[in-house]
Image (cartoon, helix red, strand yellow):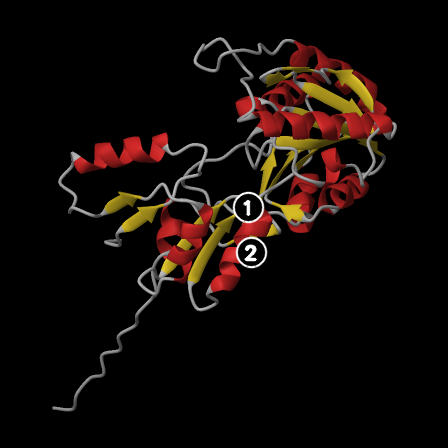
Amino acid sequence: MGAPIVVKPATATPLGALALAEAIAETDLPSGMYSVLPVSSGRAEAMVRDERFRKVSFTGSSPVGWKLKGLDPRKRFTLELGGNAGVIVHSDADLDHAAARVAFGGYYQAGQSCIAVQRVFVQSEIYDDFASRLVKHVEGLKVGDPLDPSVDVGPLIDPGALDRVAAWVDEAVAGGAQVLCGGKREDPFYLPTVLANTSREMKVRCEEVFGPVTTLDRYETFEEALAQVNDSTFGLQAGVFTRDLERAFLAHRELEVGGVIVNDVSAFRADQMPYGGSKDSGFGREGLRYAMEEMTEPRIMVLSNLPL
């Protein structure tokens, strides 16, 4: 769109943005089209207040995102914030396909993705069957160095994240949750974990785990499952496994999320999609065309016919 971009990368992971800047510097784009400032969060707040920046696109936690948006209410903002994505597995679903996809969607990048599967709701009549299939898939995931192409689950980003995930799982178990697999730390890894019998107030269910942990709970009716997915302050994406198109369309109407992925997990994303969430999951939409629209203002011109 012709607008220069200044990137403030995440403090813990600046190298990707810097490598991209080096690559762009070798192109014919004008100098200064893409800049990287690996500065502190405090300095970044000054950037948000700076009148020279007309638009802010932020990816990160909900509290920080809404705080930044409040610093200058006149600016255009896109906020891509947290999530604790829910997935529904109905009795008419292909259970092995659903289990395999949940085992991917909940644990890729060690669960450190805002659209990673976190809460799984399964109809009661198939709960035991699905649980055994899911546990088998999850126990088959390989944990290790993410640079090894055969590895499925790598480490958490830092020791603090590992401490938090372990504390949340321990808290859930102390409150009555059952560990179906995992539930252990092997620094710097946390083993892929499935928890059953969680309750809505447990952090592993009501907050964003951002780690390799999923919760597994049952429901009776499809409408009950929709309500359980909506019982969250977040609303980024959700997955629904069913062969019934009526249920799929009902989920699309009723779920308070930015995207409903049918017969796949919440972790599905394509760049041409309008990507973003509702509630505490964000504001605005990303995705190529939609991001371009978010970063521009329409200007209309009306040509009136002059009399001869």
Residue denoted by label 2: 66
Q: Is residue 296 left or right of residue 194?
A: left
Instruction: Please name whichever residue, 177 or 115, is drawn nearer the observer in this view of the structure.
Output: 177
Q: Position of residue 40 (x, y in %)?
A: 42, 45
Q: Position of residue 132 (x, y in %)?
A: 77, 14
Q: Quadrant of residue 120?
A: top right
The amino acid on which the numbered mark 1 sits, given as a three-letter code, is Leu
Other residues around mark 1 within 10 Å, as few (<14) / some (14–19) / many (≥20): many
Q: CA distance from mark 1 to mark 2?
A: 9 Å
Residue denoted by label 1: 81
Look at discs 1 and 2 and give the one toward the viewer.
2
Other residues around mark 2 within 10 Å, as few (<14) / some (14–19) / many (≥20): some
Q: Quadrant of residue 184?
A: top right
Q: Which mark is residue 31?
A: none
The amino acid on which the numbered mark 2 sits, given as a three-letter code, is Trp
Q: Are marks 1 and 2 in contact (CB under 8 Å)?
A: yes
Residue at x-position 73% and y-position 30%: 168
Residue at x-position 53% and y-position 52%: 65
